Image (spheres, helix red, strand yellow):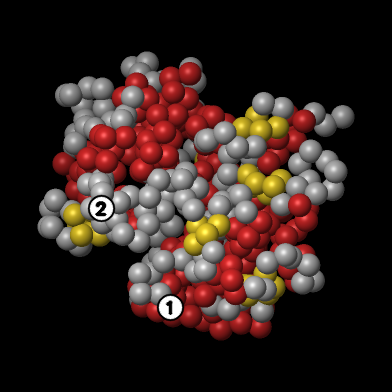
Amino acid sequence: MTSRTSEADALLSAAAVRTKARRLFERAKADHLTHFRLDLARLPGLAREVAAVTRRAYPTLDVPFHARWRHFTHAGRDRWAECDAATSWPSPAERARAAFDLVIVSVLLDAGAGAAWLYRDPLNGIAIGRSEGLALASFDMWAAGAFSDDPDNPLRADAGRLANLTVEALAEGFQAGPENPLEGLEGRARLINALGHAVLADPALRDAAGKARPGALFDVLAQGRTTLPASEILAAVLRHFGPIWPSRLTLEGVPLGDTWRHPLLDDGTPTGALVPFHKLSQWLSYSLIEPMQAAGITVTDIDGLTGLAEYRNGGLFLDGGVIVPKDAAILTADHAPDSSVIIEWRALTVALLDDIAPLVREALGVAEAAFPLARVLEGGTWATGRKLARERRADGSPPLRIVSDGTVF
């Protein structure tokens, strides 16, 4: 007999995200969803637009993976590359741990900033918002030692420091305040505190010197390996960092993270109505691939991860007319992440990213093996979603209004 715990574990995977999203997608194709219908005839044209955006940004089609590392480049300067080149790392493993520390904290601080917030780059005075601004702010905090317990070694994140990071310190680092409001500031601080506590409580997350830090996840994943499937990165992220998420759904005591309930899938079983997305965890998993590769480990089956169920990819399909609201009023209402509107939108996004990817590759004339979903996203769907948002709304906001607590989007 399958235990409820193993059922919970099964939801903590990219395969479960893909399977549950496809089930809601099939209901949409039959026009059985509550809030949306599909106009799939628009998908090929939208794919051509994504291909055009990709070619403009990457004329040689040398597209990197969709990852947090892209956001550390601003005004022509790659902040991580500059820091890396200027640092004498004691070992490749310590470099990897530092990269893990940086990107784990940065991704977890990356939920939507809102349209009003801006970060003024101290290096050039340019104000930048949204994900890129959040990335620069978190990078600057990391580089300044804001997450380190060791004044002589600022380029790290120590669990004790993270567990005690205050809202005030985060607001200062992100230049946030009444005149520059950052959505979900308190939620972000709680999430980083929870990360610190989770790492302190996890004896596996210790570096070579025995210090508790999120970057020790590198050691967990490496363990003498030369190859590693991307799905195992996500599994480790969900296993070791699962306790950090706010109290949502649990199954037999296992926290399910970015997992929500939709009544249309309820079949009477404990997991039937549950729809996982693991957006930030998958975004983090994509972002951990490059440090693993730099440490000499080949990451395989990158398409084992799914597209990201967030508002840029979701906005691509809604603004692009593939996902069609049944009631236009939902475009002006506020929606919580657990609302059936948002769950349907996110599920359709995951399924449609799988379906648009081969059409984009065909338009670009590239093979799947050379152009995995991680490149389609970066080239790609995320940028085109932002482009459509700016064309349709002056502030570039998503087409649906999401009430963010700083831990989902």
Q: Give residue 255's position: percent from left, percent from top.
A: 62, 32
155 left or right of 111 in image: left
- In the rendered image, which quarter is residue 59 located in? bottom left
Residue positioned 43% across, 30% down in the render: 195
- In the rendered image, which quarter is residue 199 located in? top left
| Residue position marked by numbered label 2 in the rendering | 180
Disc 1 crowd rating (10 Å Cα; few below 14, some 14-19, many 20+) is few
Residue positioned 26% across, 35% down in the render: 168
Q: Are marks 1 and 2 in contact (CB under 8 Å)?
A: no
**Quick check: 76 above or below 272?**
below
Is residue 380 something one can see in this rendering? no
Q: Nearer the viewer, residue 283 or 137?
A: 137
Q: Give residue 40's position: percent from left, percent from top.
A: 67, 78
Kind of element beneath mark 2: loop
| Residue position marked by numbered label 1 in the rendering | 392
Q: Earlier in the sequence, mark 1 or mark 2?
A: 2
Residue positioned 72% across, 65% down in the render: 34
- In the rendered image, which quarter is residue 92 located in? top left
Q: Using the numbered discs, state the Cα–Cα distance from disc 1 to disc 2 in whole angstroms.
A: 24 Å
272 left or right of 261 in image: right
Disc 2 crowd rating (10 Å Cα; few below 14, some 14-19, many 20+) is some
Disc 2 marks a residue whose amino acid type is: Asn
Residue positioned 48% across, 80% down in the render: 49
Disc 1 marks a residue whose amino acid type is: Arg
Kind of element beneath mark 1: helix
